[in-house]
Amino acid sequence: MIAYLAMATGFLLILIGFYGALTNRNLLRMIVAFTIADSGVNLVIVAVGYMRGRTAPILDATVPAADAAARIIDPVPQALVLTAIVIGVGVTALMLAYAYRLYEKKRSLDIAKFMDLKW
Amino acid sequence: MIKRVSVLLLLLAVGAIFATLLAGYEADPELNLTARYYADRTAADIGAANIVTAIVVTYRGLDTLGEVTVLFLSAAILGLVLAQGRKREQARRERVPAGELLTTGTRILAPLIMLLGVHVFVNGHLTPGGGFQGGAIVASGVLLLLLADPVKHFAHGLIAAVESLAGIFYVAIGLLGLLLAGGFLDNRFLPTGELGALFSAGAIPLIYSLIGLKVGAEFSAILADLSDTEEL
Amino acid sequence: MGMLMTAMTVLLCIAMIVAAFVAIAGKSLPIAILSAGLVSLVASVLFLVLASPDVAMTEAAIGSGLTTFLFFFVLGRVRKGEHDGGEHD
């Protein structure tokens, strides 16, 4: 149930993010929309790995190594999302730097002002 | 109008795909083959209590090396994009110095924040957290320093040195694993020790600390480059 | 216990969707950026509910902390362009 809810919310966040990125014309607003879609993707991947009644994949006194396979949730999606979050902030920083340079050129953040490559 | 309709149509199509995925989802009652291998073998093979760390640092260590490289590239490109034909010194001199409260608070808080970051990445194989989280916390300590003293010239040379040295040692430890143990980035050329102790899991604490320093330096470089820009 | 967890998840999900709408459709850009940070922050709580403390920590430190600051650094530099492009087209 929890996984279903989280997955549905994740998909909804991706759709909201796409909508924002496609309809807004301000560069910074488009980047904000992309970060929301990013959060949505991460949420979906983590929700896929969740299993009811199990704990985090960390071995300790309550989760001995011997019966770990019956007690923990899938650790692979978590490792994937760890990577995705870090790369996501790198991509966001790069987009922001380009937005700054574009503003420097045209003194505007309106995407409609950047027609140089359009015929 | 046409644009808005086409956007809505596109979203409807994507939403239909998502709905199919959601309707077809069934939670697995058991761990799949890969996950069960990791769950069963981590304690004996790697000796790390945190299985996510074991996957990130050792089982898929090569991917993490690639990830850190991608982060380095994005920090380097960001510096290149922002630095083109700019006179940074002038921009810095015009800035207003920070207030007394922020300066004093930073003097107390920044070392503590960095200490927390180091704690998080040194204990990455035992508790939640690790190099990426700890690196981000260290970078937020650097951010506080940047905010408290915007006029001062920031030590770009130091950040670059930490970044490159951590990267070189990361690859060197990987090669040591290739020579002394089973393969590139194998952690078992150091004793794996007792599960749950600080000095356990072979080279994982070492590798994750280097990742933490590297990631912290990369985020700090991104923040310092962005704060060196001038207002337009 | 299970009931409580489900109720909490529903609340967190609603909070995220509302914050995402504010981030996309709100008038002011600083509030949009803060709302995007809020989406990340609530997501990190949800990751904790989903038994993923590693991911929760990463999202809280990187997704909601550093990203928001990066946005504000750039927004402070391009202050005059905040309203470029209008609300929607």
Image (cartoon, coloured by chain):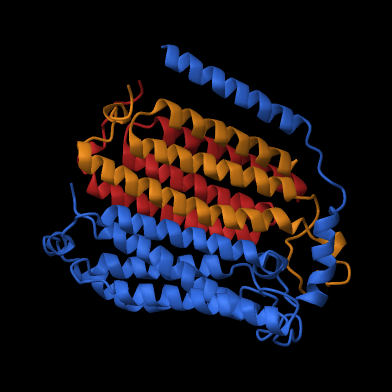
Left or right, B123 with respect to B165, comes to right
* Colour chain C appears in: red
In the displayed structure, does residue A100 sit left or right of residue B13?
left
The location of residue B180, given as percent across then percent down, is 71, 85
* The furthest residue to the top: B1
Residue shown at 74% from the left, 44% from the top = C3
Q: Residue at x 53, y 71 (%)?
A: B211
> Residue B103 lies in what quarter of the image?
bottom left
In the depicted structure, whether residue B154 falls above or below residue A107: below
The quarter of the displayed image where residue A22 is located: top left
Q: Is residue B76 left or right of residue B25?
A: left
Q: How many marks?
A: 0
Horizontal and vertical percent position of residue B66: 57, 61
- Percent position (x, y) of residue B157? 31, 75
Chain represented in blue:
B
> Image quadrant of residue C11?
top right
Chain letter for orange, please: A
Q: Which part of the image, by quadrant, shows the C terminus of chain A? A: top left
Q: How far across and how far down the image is residue A94, in percent?
A: 39, 50
Residue, x 41% and y 77% (percent of image)?
B162
- Quadrant location of the N terminus of chain A in the rendered image: top right
Which residue does the image show at 31% across and 52% down from the upper left? B81
Q: Is residue A73 visible?
A: yes
